[in-house]
Image: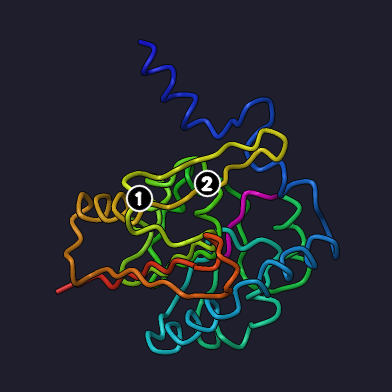
């Protein structure tokens, strides 16, 4: 009984006294856009790799999970020429800002709880996996939402030897700070039926300060639909 109650709380999205997502709800407008731009600029090498991936695969439609204030559809909209772009985020203020600045499609939702009832050619997410309240469920939902390609990044480090995810709650922010276990992600992908040749893990070095976040993680999936 206790285990069932614990799991119910785990999947509720509640972090301590603060509802999950508080940190993203309290910013809005230009302040919010500047904050996300700063986050984007910390991961330029990672974003350059994604842009190369996007150009090579040329998906017909794409879903961005955790689009924030819409850096991609606002500032890099040319990347999605001849593509159907949809962005989702848990933050109402971020989605409102996106809708006021971009003609693309935006949905305010908790991606871990709600289904979009649509498959996308490419599903991508930058730096959100580091903060979700259930890493394995996040990966599961991402894979299920894609009918071909997946591109997911984590900016807090590259942990190939970590047996399980390390999740640290920040009750003031209503968020988590996660170290992502490559071994646990691999296990999840295999459980979902993916073959070894359908997924890959890469690391990119972005700094040389002797910290975990000198490295960033990239997870790529290309489903074999034959």
Where residue 15 is drawn, which disc sits there? none
In contact (CB < 8 Å): disc 1 and disc 2: no
Q: CA distance from mark 1 to mark 2?
A: 18 Å
- Specify the quadrant that holds the N terminus: top left
Drawn side of residue 226 relative to residue 6, left or right:
left
Where residue 132 is drawn, which disc sits there? 2
Residue 99 image-quadrant placement? bottom right
| Label 1 environment density (alpha carbons within 10 Å; few <14, some 14–19, many ≥20) | some
Residue 164 locus on image (x, y percent): 35, 44
Is residue 148 covered in magenta? no
Farthest-out residue, left:
226
Drawn side of residue 57 relative to residue 225, left or right:
right
Is residue 89 covered in magenta? yes
Q: Which residue is mark 1?
A: 162
Residue 21 image-quadrant placement? top right
- Residue closest to the eye, 177 or 151: 177
Residue 214 locus on image (x, y percent): 55, 68
| Label 2 environment density (alpha carbons within 10 Å; few <14, some 14–19, many ≥20) | many
Residue sitting at 30 percent across and 49 percent down?
184
Q: Which segment did they paint magenta?
A: 87-91
Dot 1 falls on a residue whose secondary structure is loop
Question: Vertically, is 119 above or below 21?
Answer: below
Residue sitting at 43 percent across and 46 percent down?
135
Residue sitting at 60 percent across and 68 percent down?
209
Residue 133 locus on image (x, y percent): 51, 40
Q: Earlier in the sequence, mark 1 or mark 2?
A: 2
Question: Vertically, is 73 above or below 88?
Answer: below
């Amino acid at each position: 009984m206790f285990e069932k109650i614990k799991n119910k709380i785990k999947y509720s999205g509640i972090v301590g006294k603060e509802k999950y997502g508080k940190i993203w709800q309290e910013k809005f407008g230009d302040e919010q856009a500047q904050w996300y731009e700063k986050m984007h600029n910390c991961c330029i090498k990672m974003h350059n790799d994604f842009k190369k991936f996007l150009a090579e695969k040329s998906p017909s439609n794409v879903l961005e999970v955790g689009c924030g204030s819409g850096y991609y559809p606002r500032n890099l909209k040319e990347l999605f020429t001849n593509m159907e772009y949809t962005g989702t985020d848990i933050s109402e203020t971020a989605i409102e800002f996106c809708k006021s600045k971009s003609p693309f499609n935006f949905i305010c939702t908790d991606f871990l709880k709600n289904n979009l009832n649509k498959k996308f050619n490419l599903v991508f997410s930058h730096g959100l996996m580091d903060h979700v309240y259930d890493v394995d469920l996040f990966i599961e939902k991402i894979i299920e939402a894609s009918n071909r390609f997946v591109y997911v990044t984590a900016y807090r480090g590259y942990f190939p030897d970590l047996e399980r995810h390390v999740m640290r709650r920040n009750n003031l922010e209503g968020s988590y700070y996660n170290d992502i276990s490559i071994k646990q992600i691999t296990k999840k992908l295999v459980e979902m039926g993916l073959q070894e040749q359908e997924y890959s893990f890469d690391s990119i070095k972005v700094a040389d300060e002797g910290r975990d976040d000198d490295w960033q993680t990239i997870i790529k999936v290309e489903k074999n639909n034959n």
